[in-house]
Image: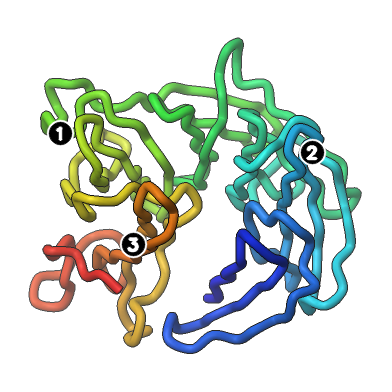
């Protein structure tokens, strides 16, 4: 695995494979990076340009960058979802930008917008159990493409107030992260600062950890399932949070099972709290 880090105030990029040491890749990156994803030996980059929309670049070495497409009406909210089947039967890169679910053909670089229904907004998304799940912050939709190109859109929903702790009633879904059998949702508390982790397994949502911390908000791009920092034999769900002034950032981790999604007694440390903070 590899994680990219970039500066919001410059064009500098770093990578890390263990969370302990970082490789500086230079300062030639496009300005205003919104998100980066790796796919087939290339880094794919979404940038934003205010009201003018955004752009997609690729690079193999973080030295030379090639513009591939222009995203209309896509300000700072451009976020990659990942590689998924398109209606033509090919694997394309899906992303959310400007409140829309779209994908880019990695061969022709053509952009396609997915029609999810009137009034539906795609703010964040994740790949989960053979489908692309998107959220508008209040609910979740499942978009699935079958082998013959048939598209299906269904409602996953979100826990109703009787199933949520009082701190989360009226909260907002800030991000999603998909694992093979579990979909994780990161939710801001409605009444005060703080973040909760919920999971969906096809039956319903459950609260894994009520609070990542009580004083900060979740960073919109900061979530991922990767090996534990300092121990590559274990996995964790990492969440990046920040204070209101965006001057202090924190990374918290919730341990996951080493293999699969189900903990093994005596082997796994699972949902163990309090969450470790880096």
Q: Secondary structure at mark 1?
A: helix
Q: Residue at x 81, y 35 (%)?
A: 52
Residue 218, percent from left and from top: 37, 49
- Of the residues under marks 1 and 2, which one precedes in the sequence? 2
In this figure, which residue is indicated by the disc labeled 2? 71
Camera-side mark, 2 or 3: 2
User: Is 165 situated above or below 197?
Assistant: above
What distance separates the C-alpha of mark 2 from that of mark 3? 30 Å
Residue 89: tell me if it is visible.
no
Q: Quadrant of residue 19?
A: bottom left
Q: Which residue is identified by label 3?
A: 237
Whether residue 135 is visible, yes or no, is yes
Neighbour class for label 2 at 10 Å: few (<14), some, many (≥20)?
A: many
Per the image, label 3 sits on a secondary structure element best described as strand
Q: CA distance from mark 3 to mark 1?
A: 22 Å
| Residue 273 placement (x, y as % from top left) | 12, 63
Label 2 SS: strand
Residue most extreme to the top: 118
Q: Report the front residue among 59 and 8.
A: 8
- For disc 3, the neighbor class at 10 Å (few under 14, some 14 to 19, many from 20) is many
Image coords of residue 137 (percent x, y): 42, 30
Mark 3 or 1: the one toward you: 1
Mark 1, residues whose alpha carbon is within 10 Å: few (<14), some, or many (≥20)? Answer: some
Residue 26, picture quadrant = bottom right
Q: Is residue 159 left or right of residue 239?
A: left
Q: Earlier in the sequence, mark 2 or mark 3?
A: 2
Residue that numbered label 1 is attached to: 167
**Residue 20: numbered disc:** none
Residue drawn at x 79%, y 38% as measured from the top left: 71
């Amino acid at each position: 695995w590899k994680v990219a880090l970039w500066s919001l105030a410059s064009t500098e990029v770093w990578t890390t494979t263990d969370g302990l040491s970082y490789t500086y890749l230079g300062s030639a990156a496009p300005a205003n990076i919104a998100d980066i994803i790796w796919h087939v030996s290339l880094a794919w980059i979404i940038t934003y340009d205010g009201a003018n929309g955004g752009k997609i670049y690729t690079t193999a070495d973080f030295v030379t960058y090639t513009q591939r497409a222009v995203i209309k009406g896509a300000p700072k909210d451009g976020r990659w979802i990942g590689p998924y089947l398109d209606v033509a039967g090919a694997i394309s890169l899906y992303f959310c930008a400007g409140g829309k679910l779209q994908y880019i053909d990695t061969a022709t670089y053509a952009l396609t917008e997915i029609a999810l229904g009137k009034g539906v907004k795609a703010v964040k998304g994740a790949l989960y159990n053979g489908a692309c799940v998107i959220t508008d912050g209040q609910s979740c939709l499942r978009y699935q493409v079958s082998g013959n190109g048939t598209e299906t859109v269904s409602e996953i929903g979100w826990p109703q107030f009787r199933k949520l702790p009082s701190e989360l009633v009226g909260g907002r879904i800030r991000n999603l992260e998909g694992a093979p059998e579990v979909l994780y949702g990161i939710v801001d508390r409605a009444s005060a600062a703080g973040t909760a982790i919920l999971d969906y397994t096809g039956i319903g949502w459950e609260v894994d950890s009520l609070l990542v911390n009580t004083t900060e908000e979740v960073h919109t791009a900061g979530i991922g399932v990767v090996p534990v920092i300092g121990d590559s034999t274990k996995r964790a769900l990492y969440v990046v949070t920040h204070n209101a002034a965006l001057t202090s950032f924190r990374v918290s981790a919730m341990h996951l099972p080493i293999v699969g999604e189900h903990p093994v007694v005596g082997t796994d440390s699972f949902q163990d709290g309090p969450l470790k903070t880096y």
